Amino acid sequence: MHEFSIVASLFENLESLANKHKATRILEVEVELGERSGVNKELFYRAFEEYKIGSKAKMAQLKIKEVKVTLFCQDCKEELEVKELDYTHCPKCKQDRVKIVKGNEMLLTHVEME
């Protein structure tokens, strides 16, 4: 359950941001979780709820945007969203010269502070 260590690191960053901007409260936190990030959305949310107790984010709302896997095909020269669990072949031309360009990430995209 590595989600708790990920959220611990997130809260270090949130507290640092709040201190840098002289904020007393964090109201909203938005993250993007890639489908292949290895992060379980429910466990991440649960860890966030635990970590926010007693912090500047104690009243914060967590918004999670799930990001689907997108491949770049070197043959088609296109980015294509993957509909099936095959991340090794282009969904259009079926060639194997692809690279995952979205869906592996976990990003902090928005923080609202007061």
Image: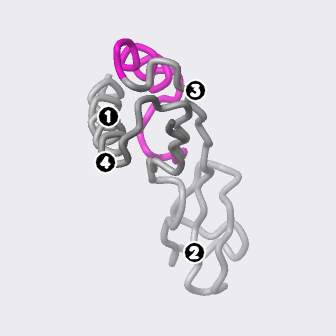
Task: Kindly report the distance in space between the C-alpha atoms of the residues bearing marks 3 and 4.
Answer: 21 Å
- Residue at figure coordinates x 45%, y 18% from the top left: 58
Q: Assess disc 3: are there few (<14), some (14-19) or many (≥20) residues with their C-alpha within 10 Å of its C-alpha.
A: some
Q: Quadrant of residue 86?
A: bottom right
Asked whether 46 or 114 is in front, the reply is 114
Which range of residues does the magenta coloring cover?
Answer: 33-55
- In-image side of 68 versus 14 (left or right): right
Of the residues under marks 1 and 3, which one precedes in the sequence? 1
Q: Quadrant of residue 77?
A: bottom right
Q: Position of residue 59 (x, y in %)?
A: 52, 19
Of the residues under marks 4 and 2, which one precedes in the sequence? 4
Mark 1 = which residue? Answer: 6
Task: Kindly report the distance in space between the C-alpha atoms of the residues bearing marks 1 and 2.
Answer: 28 Å
Tell me if residue 45 is in the magenta stretch.
yes
Mark 2 = which residue? Answer: 72
Asked whether 73 or 6 is in front, the reply is 6
Q: Does dot 3 land on a helix, a strand or a loop?
A: strand
Of the residues under marks 1 and 2, which one precedes in the sequence? 1
Q: Assess disc 4: are there few (<14), some (14-19) or many (≥20) residues with their C-alpha within 10 Å of its C-alpha.
A: few
Viewer-nearest of discs 4 and 2 = 4
Using the image, tell me which numbered label, if any, was put on residue 106.
none
Viewer-nearest of discs 1 and 4 = 4
Q: Position of residue 31 (x, y in %)?
A: 52, 43
